[in-house]
Amino acid sequence: MPDSSPILGLDLGTKEHALASAATEGSPILGIDLGTTNSLVGVVDSGFPILLADEEGQRLTPSAVNYGADGSHIVGAAALRKRALEPQRTVTSVKRLIGRRAGEGGWQPPYDLRQLDTSPVEVSADILKRLKAIAERALEQPVSRAVITVPAYFNDAQRNATKQAGELAGLTVERIVSEPTAAALAYGLDKLDERKKIAVYDLGGGTFDISVLEMRDGVFQVLSTAGDTQLGGDDIDRAVVAHVLKGQGGQEGQGVRASSPHDEGRMASLLGAVEAAKKRLSTEEEVRIELPFFDGVQSLSVELTRAAFDKLARPLIERTRAHCLRALSDAKVKPEELDEVILVGGSTRIPLVRSYVEEIFGRVPNTSQNPDEAVALGAVIQAGILSGSLKNVLLLDVTPLSLGIETFGGLMNIIIPRNSTIPCKAGEMFTNAVANQKDMLIRVLQGERELAKDNWELGRIEIPFPPGAKGSARVGVQFAIDANGILEVLARDTATGTDTVLAIQNTAVNVDDERVEQMIAESVEYAFEDMNERVWTEARLKAEELLPAVEAALGQFGDAVTPEEKAVIEAAAAQVRAVLTTPEHDVKALKAANQALDDATQELAVRLVEQAMEESLVRRGLV
Ligand code: AMP
């Protein structure tokens, strides 16, 4: 059972802390937006954050890698061009897979990474190598350090996998930053003296993130984050492709047969054409999707109006509403208290997205940022802070889910609550709940449910200790989350001073990140049942402590207890036992039975103390 004496206070990041972590000034640190669809790289040059272009003058590098049969690796636009011919050899949207178990997540890419003899980390490393090369060419010097952005909802495993990819590409990853946080940083750089509450609505190719931040005196604090790791422009593209294939795109569309959906090359070119049409629809009222000889002989020619497109995209866009409301409620901010709603991510160019965001937040969103570049710019600014080339700005991030350990009775004991500012440390002292316990098993959990079994286990530590009375052992447990959101758990046996450290490096095995949102939704849905179960468990533990104590006291008193007293106490104890065995877990009844037993033994307890005192005085010859 926990007692509440903390072994370490909560150590929130401070201005000094972030600036102290700035590494040696001079050597450039790259800021990298490793996007699902596109990636960007930049650096602070002469005090200004800039994004770097490749040989062709392009700043956006498509996050695509083509693995040639001859062993070649082509990254970027050239890889994308090969996708239509070699869909199975061209890896795109790998960010959806990074840090996950194979086959997890529902989304099926057209390629098989095992057949290509690679992994999501290696593919990401190939993209990062390309970005590093673009930067080295532009800067005319080698670079070895970087700040990389990830969706706010990335869990430990995904953040670690991203870090690993950086290292594999020859980059020391100085910090992992959440994308909306980076975007807010880019937005706030020229308004440092202002105090603002900002929402960042980030709808990209593969993910949706919403964050509420507070910006004050150059300090950024993320108040809350929410999102969906499987929602973005790619889904809109697929909805349009399905519509085209169903022949619902007007008369001309009926020439398209849906009988050959497995022809992946053709599907890839259709996807490409649909995406291009979607982009044009952001500024035009109607477009024509044309693919010559699409169906072997027949060409495809489908007209798509903005209204028809909106109808297809709306259900997907509407899925962002619940996340926005959740982020606002977590941050305890009303929509009208927001100073700005910033739009980030390529898909926020869609007019329907803009009007829908306006509807949710009741204000016209700010589109001053280039939605493709804001995140990268923020990463560059953070890199500039770390390298010492930009000063007076600081970033504070938050944990997306609560972290804690299982305590006696199977309850979740939260050590670092959801939305805590990171980096942070917090700890508690724990003791053995039963006598002669030989070891203590610390199960590290992540999640929002009251019962340990409903949360995710990230790892476990076993601490052996010599058998002793209940409450004799004392183990301090400290959780530390570093600036990258990576968790380290330290358990200290205070008797021996022995430390056991568990670094949560690979939680992919245990954590299904898709369930992050489900976890939050379930915690709300089951809040009543969960709380009932927690209170029941606490009352049950109390009863289980009370019953043997009462029995022992009755034995000790023997004849000194009158038969009437004994009958009352035994009846109260029997009532507690009876309620304990009922399946419906009636908390009220158990609490009342516990109280009645407590009251019935009150006099006995007083007499026990008095008797002990008298015996002590007699022993010491004072009476
Ligand atoms: P990001 O992940 O932020 O690079 O966003 C990429 C997504 O934005 C892709 O799904 C693109 O198709 C989409 N996108 C880019 N430009 C536009 C545009 N003008 N209109 C609609 N969607 C766009």
Image: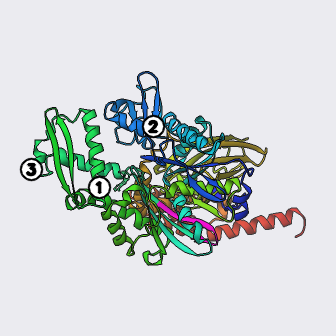
Farthest-out residue, right? 621
Q: Does the magenta stretch include residue 217?
A: yes
Residue 439 visible to the viewer = no
Query: Earlier along the polypeptide chain: callout 2 or callout 1?
Result: 2
Q: Tell me whether circle 2 and circle 1 mark residues in contact (CB < 8 Å).
A: no
Query: Earlier along the polypeptide chain: callout 2 or callout 3?
Result: 2
Q: What residue type is labelled 3?
A: Gln
* 540 lies left or right of 436: left
Instruction: Measure how far apart labels 2 and 3 are at the Cα level.
Output: 44 Å
Which residue carries the number 1 mark?
Answer: 280
Query: Earlier along the polypeptide chain: callout 3 or callout 1?
Result: 3
- Numbered disc 2: secondary structure: loop
* Boundaries of the magenta span: 215-225
Residue 603 visible to the viewer = yes
Instruction: Measure how far apart labels 3 and 1 are at the Cα level.
Output: 21 Å
Which residue carries the number 3 mark?
Answer: 251
For ligand 1, tell me if the residue under mark 1 lies within 8 Å.
yes
Which residue carries the number 2 mark?
Answer: 101
